[in-house]
Amino acid sequence: MDPFRDLARLQDEVGRLFDDRLYRSGESVGWTPSCDIYEDEDGVTLRFELAGVEPKDVDVRFENGVLTLRGERKLEREDKRENYHRVELEYGTFTRSFTLPSTVDPEKIKAESKNGILNVYLPKKAEAKPRAIQVKVT
C-alpha cells in the first residue's frame, strides 16, 4: 500500500468531481453570488460580490415587486483548463431574486458596479420614510 499513490488517486477523483460540478455536457451549471442587504431610513441597499463578472454580463430588473439579478462569470481560457492546478472560483450563470416591500420607489432604483461589487440602491417612497414628530411639553 503506497499512501502517496492513494493520495494522488484521491486528488484525481476530487478533480473529476469538481470538473463534473462545473460542466455537464459542456454547459455551465451556475453559482450564487454573495449578497449583503442593509436598510436605513432612506432606503434599502443590496451589495453583490461579483468579482470577475463584467458589468455588461449583468442584468438587473424590477418587475411586479421583485428585483432580479441575472448574469454570468465566464471562465477565461476554457480550452486550457487542464493546466489549472486548482479551480475554486465558481463560474457560469447566476440568478438571484428578492421580493421588495411596497415602500420601495421603483422609479428611483439605481445600480452601480465598482471593484467587483454591485450596489443596487432601492430608495423608499417619501410617505414610507420615518418622520420625527416634536412633542411639546406643557
Image (cartoon, rainbow, N blue to C red):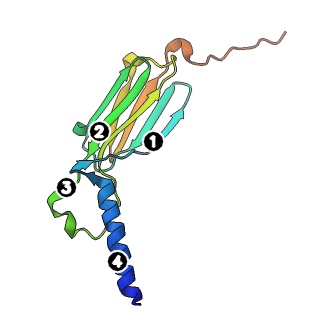
Q: Quadrant of the C terminus?
A: top right
Q: CA distance from mark 2 to mark 4?
A: 36 Å
- Residue 76 shows which numbered tag? 3
Coordinates of residue 85 in the picture (x, y in percent): 28, 71
Q: In what element is the residue under mark 1? A: strand
- x 33%, y 50%: residue: 51
Earlier along the polypeptide chain: callout 2 or callout 1?
1
Q: Are marks 1 and 4 in contact (CB under 8 Å)?
A: no
Q: Nearer the viewer, mark 4 or mark 3?
A: 4
- Check disc 2 and report the residue beneath it: 71
- Check disc 1 and report the residue beneath it: 35
As shown in the figure, which amino acid type bears the numbered disc 2?
Answer: Gly
- State left or right for residue 80 relative to residue 68: left
Instruction: Choose top left, top right, bottom left or bottom right for residue 114.
Output: top left
Seen in the picture, residue 49 relative to 107 is either above or below; the reply is: below
- State left or right for residue 3 relative to residue 116: right
Q: Are marks 2 and 1 in contact (CB under 8 Å)?
A: no
As shown in the figure, which amino acid type bears the numbered disc 4?
Answer: Arg
